[in-house]
Structures are given as C-alpha cells and as structure tokens.
Image: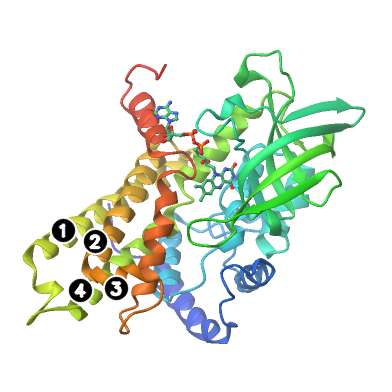
Amino acid sequence: MDLRYSEAELAFRAELRAWLAEVLPTLPPKPDPDDWPARRAFDTGWQRLLFEAGYAGINWPTEVGGRGATLTEQLIYLEETTRAGAPYVGVNFVGLLHAGPTLMTEASDEQKAAHLPRILRGDEVWCQGFSEPGAGSDLAALSCRAELDGDEYVITGQKIWTSFAQVADYGELLVRTDPDAPKHKGITWLILPMDIPGIEIRPLQTIVGSTEFSEVFFDEARVPVANRVGAENDGWRIAMVTFSFERGTAFISDLVETDRMISDLVALAKKVTRRSATAWDDKALRREVGRMQADMDALWALTKRNLAQADRHGVPGPGGSVVKLYYSELLQRLTDLAMQILDRASLSRTDVAGLGSGAFVEERLRSTSFTIAAGTSQIQRNIVAERILGLPKDR
Ligand SMILES: Cc1cc2nc3c(=O)[nH]c(=O)nc-3n(C[C@H](O)[C@H](O)[C@H](O)COP(=O)(O)OP(=O)(O)OC[C@H]3O[C@@H](n4cnc5c(N)ncnc54)[C@H](O)[C@@H]3O)c2cc1C
C-alpha cells in the first residue's frame, strides 16, 4: 500500500488551496446566528461558489453533477477547507449529506433529475421530518398519517425537532401509510414540498438561544404520489439508508473541526495564567489533551475505513455509529476541559480578556445536543452491540 500522495492528488490540493485563498476573503460577513433568511443566503451562496468552481458534491458521482473525487481527494478537500476556515455546509446539511445521497440510491430518475442538480447548486434547501413527540429513538412508532386520495397523499399529524424547517424548500418526510401493518412495515418516505397549504412551522429555541429547529404541523396537506421515494410501506428500509449516510459520513467535517478545536484549546491553555504559571504548565491537563488527540487520531483512522467501505458498497456501514458515538462524547469532554481552563470566564457567553472564551462556551452548550441528534448515544451503543458485535437484540 502506497501511503504517499500521487502527483495528481498533490496538484488537487494545491489547486484547491489556491482557490480557497482567492475566494474566502471575498465572502460577506457571517450573518447573525438567528437570522435564518440571511443564513440561508450565506450558506447557499457559498454552495453556489463551490458549484461554479467544480467542488460541489465532492463525493457525488459525476453523472449527477458531482465531482466524483477519489477517497483521498475527499479527505484532502476536508482537510483544506477546514484548515482555511471555509464556511461549513450549514443549512445545506440535510440536502448534501443525507437527503441527496438517499435520492441517489433510492429515487426514480425523474426525482433525481428534479432535485440533485438544484441541491448541488445551492438552489434547494432540505430538512428532515422524521421525529415526532411520541417517536424519537423508537422512530418506527411514528403516527403522522398519510391517506391516499386519488394521486395525492393527504397528510395529518406532527413532526418535531425539524432542523432548518423555516428555510427549507423540501423535507424528507416519514409517514404512516398502513396503520394496521406491523409498525416497521406501514411507513412511507416522501419528498415534502415545504410551501404547500396545510403546513404550519413553529420554531423552537435551543439552549444556545437560536431557533434552529421547529415543530411542523400538518392539517390535510396534500403531497403528490409522484413524490414517493420507493414503494408504499417500504419507507423504513429507505429511512435506514438515510441514517447510514447521516451517521456514517455526514459527521466527517465536524471531526476535522474538532481536531482544530484541540489546537485552539492548547492555545487557550497557554494564554490562561494561574499564579506564576499558565494552565498549559499543568501536567495533568497536558496528559488529558494528549489522550484526546490520540482519540481523534483513532477516530480519523476509523473514518477513513468507513469512507473506504462506503465507496465500495455505495452506502456506509454501521461503523458510522462508532464514530458518531465516540466523536459526540469526545466533543463534550473537550469542551468540558475548556470550561475548566476558563474557570470563571466560562460563566459568560461574551468574550473575556481576549481569550475567545465565548466561542468555547457556545460550543459547550451546543455539544449537549450532539449525543441526542441523529440517534442518541444509547441507541448508537445498541447498534454497535447488535450490528457490529453480534450481541442479542435490544428488547
Ligand atoms: C440538535 C438536534 C437536531 C435534530 N434535528 C432533527 C431533524 O432535523 N429531524 C428529525 O426528524 N429529528 C431531529 N432531531 C431529533 C432526534 O433525532 C431525536 O431527539 C433523537 O432521535 C431522540 O429522540 P427523542 O428526543 O424522542 O428521545 P427519546 O427517544 O424519548 O429518548 C429519551 C431517552 O431514552 C433513551 N432511550 C430510548 N430508547 C432507548 C433504548 N431502546 N435503549 C436505551 N436507551 C433508550 C434515549 O437514549 C434518551 O436518553 C434533532 C435533535 C437534536 C437534539
């Protein structure tokens, strides 16, 4: 196995680095975190720039307009964009990282042609309508009902925790089409246009103070049968495909970002003084940071393995659950350590003494949700136990 980069890969890195250096200084300032129309404009504007330069959908096949990059090029792309501080996918998260890939795998040619190019260009933003008040970890208990009426499904019910709903054009919607079938067998996966009559979106505020997710209510909203992905009542299988992308590869850029946060934490510890020394002079703290860096390196190796598997099989395997579980808990350990270093400065969300403390406090609050979103840590442990270790099923 040759672990060195090829000439072509080195050229790809240099070309991307040069493009980022040229384009990043021209970006408008980042919008206010709770100004959703402005956030949509910023994130989709960035997506359009990527598209025009040929970097959109780096791992998407060329047939659907993606870059079709090799595995190594994908990793180079992640390293370079993170190193340069390029914007994150933001409101394009669902479309690019799991709705688009699900459509690529499961949708009809018409559905692919209607949505994939628009997602890539930043013209279409997606959200995910899976969870309900009575169906989170036990998602198959969902009760949002879809009744067939001619060539339309009539939807009545509620979804919750729908991230980006207020700025989305479409949603991945799971509905119950057969209430009499066993619970996993009566579910259908629909492409939901968010602008149809009968949909009400009520934003919910998070601990960080932003309204990033919403409750979504349906009162006889009509969705064409042509928007069904796959067969009626086969939605559970398709939802598992969506999850394999969401847990398998969607978190990778967060991983690179967390790696950067470890360097920021070291810089912080060197600035914070304790009597005549700095926090970094504390051996126990250095040992903990070293352990986290080693954990990150192991996670990165595992990620490369998962990516290689996804490349071979088209869909990521359950290994993504290990990364999701370990990464989300590592991020909480990392931000807890930052709070210890900041001490009293961690009580304020405003920056104290030029330490960049506000960003760490915000990340600590935000990271609370990471062990819940996209399947809780307990559920990931069940998946690892059953699907990787072959232990008996959770009753
Ligand atoms: C930031 C954020 C964004 C989100 N975005 C979306 C979105 O865009 N779209 C969407 O559809 N959903 C979204 N969600 C919802 C998310 O998928 C659910 O919160 C998650 O699946 C857990 O479901 P729940 O909240 O109903 O908790 P519950 O399922 O009620 O769980 C409560 C507790 O019980 C534990 N538990 C439950 N079952 C088991 C079991 N079998 N074994 C062991 N422990 C168990 C759980 O681990 C948890 O600790 C988001 C959540 C967050 C936090």
Task: Report which residue position mark 1 lands on.
Answer: 288
Task: Report which residue position mark 2 lands on.
Answer: 337
Of the two numbered discs 3 and 1 in the rendering, the one whose residue sits closer to the viewer: 3
Of the two numbered discs 3 and 2 in the rendering, the one whose residue sits closer to the viewer: 3
Q: Quick check: marks 1 and 2 in contact, CB under 8 Å?
A: yes
Q: Position of residue 115 (x, y in %)?
A: 74, 52
Q: Quick check: marks 3 and 2 in contact, CB under 8 Å?
A: no
Q: CA distance from mark 3 to mark 1?
A: 21 Å
Q: Amino acid at mark 4?
A: Ala
Whether 184 is drawn above or below 34: the answer is above
Q: Amino acid at mark 2?
A: Leu
Of the two numbered discs 3 and 4 in the rendering, the one whose residue sits closer to the viewer: 3
The verdict on label 3 being within 8 Å of ligand 1 is no
Q: Is residue 117 left or right of residue 277?
A: right
Count of marks overlaid on the render: 4
Q: Position of residue 329 (x, y in %)?
A: 32, 48
Q: Earlier in the sequence, mark 3 or mark 2?
A: 2
Q: Amino acid at mark 1?
A: Glu
Extreme-right residue of the structure: 150
Q: Amino acid at mark 3?
A: Ala
Whether 61 is drawn above or below 54: the answer is above
Task: Report which residue position mark 4 lands on.
Answer: 269
Task: Report which residue position mark 3 lands on.
Answer: 345
